[in-house]
């Protein structure tokens, strides 16, 4: 038998790409409706907590003097851990300085606006509207700025009148407020970043895009 030989040659063209540029655009993205709704529930709870803190700050700002029983309760633990206890008069002076600086009022107004926007945004996000995460993110930014600034003013008042564990508490609260509002903003913006979550959102116009067999888009 004669031996057959086969000669194969492959011609490569450097200018032609073996993978089309638009291959990723052709891959369909499956919308994720459960993820945005889960985030919406978490944002709604967070918005209520923000509103509660705003109400607490507004109530504190309206007090000329903290009730003596409340002052004793607040000072009991810090004074038990310090050799130089804080007197009720020093704490009342701290409250007066913090109130006069506007720290409580700035934080109350800012967090009230922030909480309302986060709640409204979470409701729209639960309805899978694109405006939801945008509104909630705006609220988180407002809460971040006003919360940090108001807490900073209160911390300055605590530096002048308090010391020990209670002073450290107000310093930590500045970072805690900023961290919580940053996380709230990150959760709010997540549906705008994640491709599957973004694909599930609509603009509320009621238009639905359908793809026919030829790949063209039709609107209903």
Image (cartoon, grey):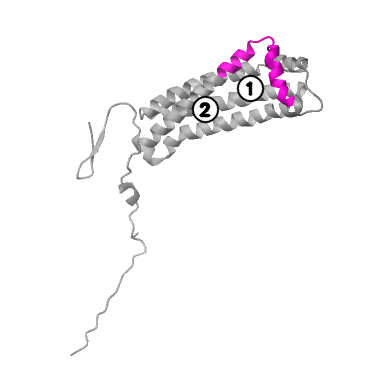
**Residue 149 placement (x, y as % from top left):** 63, 24
Which mark is on residue 150? 1
- Mark 1: secondary structure: helix
Please tell me which residue lies in front, 110 or 55: 55
When the figure is inspected, residue 16 is found, relative to residue 157, above or below; the finding is below
- Secondary structure beneath label 2: helix
Locate residue 64, reporting x and y percent.
68, 9
Q: Residue at x 67, y 15 (%)?
A: 70
The span shown in magenta is: 54-78
Query: Is disc 1 surrounded by few (<14), some (14 to 19) or many (20+) residues within 10 Å?
Result: many
Which image quadrant: the N terminus? Answer: bottom left
**As rendered, which of 62 and 156 lies closer to the eye?**
62
- The single residue placed furthest to the left in the displayed view is 1
Image: 207 above or below 106: below
Give yes or no for residue 206 being in the magenta stretch.
Answer: no
Residue 74 belongs to magenta span = yes
Instruction: State the CA–CA distance, disc 1 to disc 2.
Output: 15 Å
Please name the residue shown 50% across and 27% down the image.
Answer: 46
Residue 167's image quarter? top right
Mark earlier in primary sequence (1, 2): 2
The answer to which of 21 and 190 lies nearer the viewer is 190
């Amino acid at each position: 038998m004669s031996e057959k030989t086969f000669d194969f040659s492959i011609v490569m063209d450097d200018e032609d790409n073996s993978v089309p540029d638009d291959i990723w655009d052709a891959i369909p993205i499956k919308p994720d409706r459960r993820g945005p709704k889960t985030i919406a529930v978490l944002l709604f709870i967070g918005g209520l907590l923000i509103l509660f803190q705003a109400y607490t700050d507004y109530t504190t700002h309206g007090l000329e003097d903290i009730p003596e029983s409340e002052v004793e309760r607040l000072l009991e633990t810090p004074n038990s851990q310090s050799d130089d206890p804080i007197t009720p008069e020093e704490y009342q002076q701290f409250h007066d300085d913090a109130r006069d600086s506007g720290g409580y009022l700035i934080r109350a107004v800012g967090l009230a606006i922030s909480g309302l926007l986060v709640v409204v945004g979470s409701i729209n996000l639960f309805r899978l509207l694109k405006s939801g995460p945008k509104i909630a993110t705006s609220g988180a930014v407002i809460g971040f700025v006003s919360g940090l600034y108001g807490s900073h003013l209160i911390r300055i008042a605590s530096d002048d009148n308090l010391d020990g564990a209670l002073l450290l508490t107000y310093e930590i609260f500045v970072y805690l407020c900023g961290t919580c509002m940053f996380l709230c903003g990150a959760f709010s913006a997540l549906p705008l970043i994640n491709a599957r979550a973004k694909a599930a959102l609509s603009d509320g116009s009621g238009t639905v895009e359908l793809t026919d067999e030829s790949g063209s888009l039709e609107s209903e």
